[in-house]
Image (cartoon, rainbow, N blue to C red):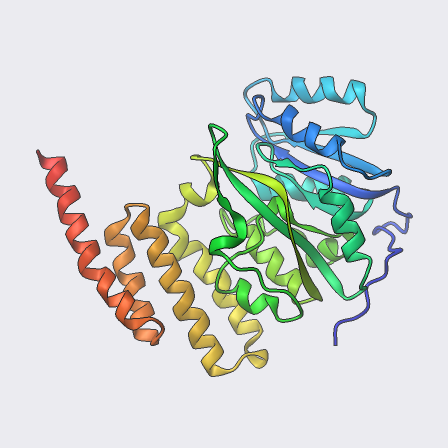
Amino acid sequence: MTKPINYFSSDENGNENEYEISVIIPAYNAAETIGRAVDSVRIQKIASLEIIIIDDGSTDNTAEIIEALTRHDCNIHLVRMAKNSGVSAARNEGIRQARGEFLAFLDADDVWLADKLSKQITEIRTNPQISLVSCNSHLISESGEYLKEGHVNRRPVEGIDAWKTLLIYNFLPTPTVLTYRHLVQTLGGFNENLAVGEDLDLWIRLALMGEVRVLKDVLIHYYDSSGSLMKRYLSQSETIVMPMLELHLFEQKKKLTVVEIRNIRGLRSFQMGCNLFFAGEYLESIPIFMRAAISGVRPIKSLLYIPRALFMAVINWTLRKI
């Protein structure tokens, strides 16, 4: 049984919350977009809100831009990291500085629509069992063109068993999430040992503590960055993300049937194989598709991808030799 959530939580020092929401924004060389992101927070219809921007060792003028913003708004706080430490360490430092009852996460190149926080706060206060609230999004290209709706390819799941679906695929982009600060602190924040998948890891742990609610409203514009962590570490996802998921499967094995565990492994492998294949990592996708086929989940589709991957790998090798 999940313990009821206390709306009037205090921080670890016993101090009452000073704000309703703390917005955590990590920023690394984000001079071109940080102003746009902050503006999208300032239009939120929330009376008590702080914006904590963590400059993660930027080498451009990100910090100077943030300092200028703080001079015009006393609720904007700049936190400087001594060196570039990664998004997890930056967010965790922001969480340590936060004094809001709730936490909301925004990346420096994304934007919220005006009703994002007010709709999520209204929703999370309807039920003390809700541990996090998300929403729908529009994926936008770097040039500003609409690409797709967030929920089209990754159907969200609500309720107390949403963590099971999160083990298969992540339907919670980081900028969509609003949750309780004391829950995140209890869980220890983001795992700084994970180069990628640190957000999924935390969402799974939060989902295990209560119910997940997902609003159908499109409340963020999520920008498709060519330099995103997931894209940079895609070829290593097998060695980074899978061990994290296997740990969750081990810890929750008493809550899962043998069939559920097999399906989770098979569907996650099939999805990972597809991600690698369509990113041009053809040879890397082959053992992943083989594992999916062995699991008995989508075996025909998985096996059909293997000769296609081999063919494309040969084509690429031939083109490089010409």
Q: Is residue 226 above or below residue 308?
A: above
* Left or right, 184 with reference to 141: right
Q: Is residue 316 left or right of residue 3?
A: left
* Picture quarter with the C terminus: top left
- Residue 110 appears at what percent x and percent y? 59, 35
Q: Quadrant of the N terminus?
A: bottom right
Percent of width and height locating residue 292: 33, 68
Q: Nearer the viewer, residue 68 or 112?
A: 112
Compared to 119, does 243 lie above or below?
A: below
Residue 80, visible in the rendered structure: no
Residue at image x 75%, y 72%? 2
Image coordinates of residue 182 in percent, x first then y, are 78, 55
User: Is residue 56 placed above or below 9 in the rendered structure?
Assistant: above
Q: Nearer the viewer, residue 39 or 230?
A: 39
Q: Residue at x 71, y 43 (%)?
A: 116
Residue shown at the point (27%, 62%) measured from the top left? 287
The part of the image, by quadrant, that contains residue 183 is: bottom right
Q: In the image, is residue 255 above or below residue 245?
A: below
